[in-house]
């Protein structure tokens, strides 16, 4: 199933050009975030990153709608993006808020015992982010392919993963491998291009590297180096995002059909009305 899903994703990338809009959008955001520090305006870069993240659900919904097959053209892409935008955005916000609240609750006992919150924060973030991501990763596909509402899409993602955790783990691992195969060569290529510029950093003290500001790093790499990184990153992110999102959508659609959501528990009364437990 996973291999067939990957083949279908590649086929959809070839016969549905609208899918590349999402990849081009993410690639453009990445390139801008890399180039803006060269202007010295770090606030602008943060704003673009935040606004880009807020707009991302529109492009995700459009891509999934095109794969769903209602209309694979630009019009269908835009229509699906508008239809599912708020559903995906609100569900993602709920997940993020729940994760942050969990981090705070986890840190409270540690802080009361006299520990430093900053020392425990990385471990708390990692310990909470991994299980949250593992179980809620498919909320957006559930919202589009099964037309689920906000909270129902989150619940459906948990059901989908817990229904076959091994299948989910294999999918996650393969996605990580694909991402590694795409982005590692891009990183190596950029490293070769700016090797002479970053050579002084190789033997630098760890303390110096930790205290280095973004402006200092930009001065070392240079504008031509950043431009090369922006071009390479744009191409890698465009292809990688298009492939991975398409793979996720095709995998979920196939797996959800093979393992539909369980029926809700309940019973009918004497008048034929359904009451859910």
Image: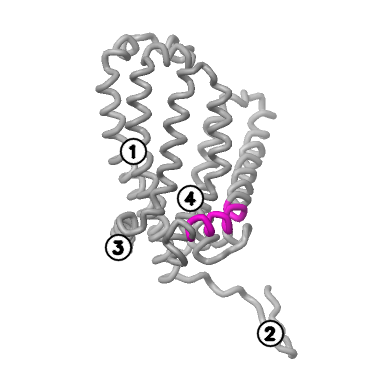
Q: Secondary structure at mark 1?
A: helix
Which residue is found at the position 41% from the left and 42% from the top? Answer: 24
Instruction: Give the magenta part as a residue range.
Output: 76-88
Q: Which residue is mark 4?
A: 134
| Left or right: 45 in relation to 111 | left
Residue 113, percent across and down?
A: 66, 28
Q: Which residue is mark 2?
A: 268
**Image depth: mark 2 or mark 3 in front:** 3
- Contact, CB < 8 Å: mark 2 with mark 3? no
Q: Secondary structure at mark 2?
A: strand
For marks 1 and 4, the one nearer the N-term is 4
Q: Which residue is mark 1?
A: 236
For marks 2 and 3, the one nearer the N-term is 3
Disc 2 to disc 3, how far (Cα)?
A: 41 Å
Question: As drawn, which residue projects farthest toward the bottom?
Answer: 270
Q: Is residue 158 visible?
A: no
For marks 3 and 1, the one nearer the N-term is 3
Considering depth in this image, is 227 or 193 the residue closer to the camera? 227
Q: Which residue is mark 3?
A: 4
Residue 56, percent across and down?
A: 52, 45
Residue 143, percent across and down?
A: 55, 60
**Image depth: mark 3 or mark 1 in front:** 1
Image-quadrant location for residue 12: bottom left
Q: Is residue 47 visible?
A: yes
For marks 4 and 2, the one nearer the N-term is 4
**Image depth: mark 1 or mark 4 in front:** 1
Disc 3 to disc 1, how far (Cα)?
A: 23 Å
Which residue is found at the position 45% from the left and 56% from the top? Answer: 74
Disc 4 to disc 2, how far (Cα)?
A: 35 Å
Which residue is found at the position 48% from the left and 17% from the top? Answer: 214
């Amino acid at each position: 199933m996973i291999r067939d899903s990957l083949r279908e994703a590649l086929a959809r990338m070839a016969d549905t050009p609208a899918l590349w809009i999402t990849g081009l959008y993410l690639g453009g955001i990445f390139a801008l975030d890399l180039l803006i520090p060269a202007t010295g305006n770090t606030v602008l870069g943060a704003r673009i990153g935040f606004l880009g993240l807020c707009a991302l659900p529109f492009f995700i919904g459009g891509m999934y709608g095109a794969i769903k097959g209602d209309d694979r053209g630009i019009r269908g892409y835009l229509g699906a993006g508008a239809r599912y935008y708020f559903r995906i955005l609100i569900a993602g916000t709920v997940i993020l808020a729940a994760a942050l609240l969990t981090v705070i609750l986890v840190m409270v006992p540690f802080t009361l015992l006299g520990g430093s919150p900053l020392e425990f924060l990385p471990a708390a973030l990692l310990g909470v982010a991994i299980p949250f991501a593992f179980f809620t990763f498919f909320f957006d596909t559930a919202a589009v392919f099964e037309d689920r509402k906000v909270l129902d899409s989150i619940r459906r993602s948990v059901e989908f993963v817990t229904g076959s955790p091994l299948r989910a783990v294999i999918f996650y691992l393969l996605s990580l491998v694909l991402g590694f195969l795409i982005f590692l060569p891009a990183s190596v290529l950029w490293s070769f291009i700016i090797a002479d510029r970053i050579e002084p950093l190789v033997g630098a003290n760890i303390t110096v590297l930790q205290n280095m500001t973004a402006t200092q790093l930009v001065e070392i790499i240079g504008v031509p180096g950043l431009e090369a990184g922006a071009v390479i990153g744009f191409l890698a992110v465009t292809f990688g995002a298009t492939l991975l999102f398409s793979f996720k959508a095709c995998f979920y659609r196939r797996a959800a059909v093979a393992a539909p959501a369980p029926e809700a528990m309940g019973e009918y009364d004497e008048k034929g009305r359904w009451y859910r437990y």
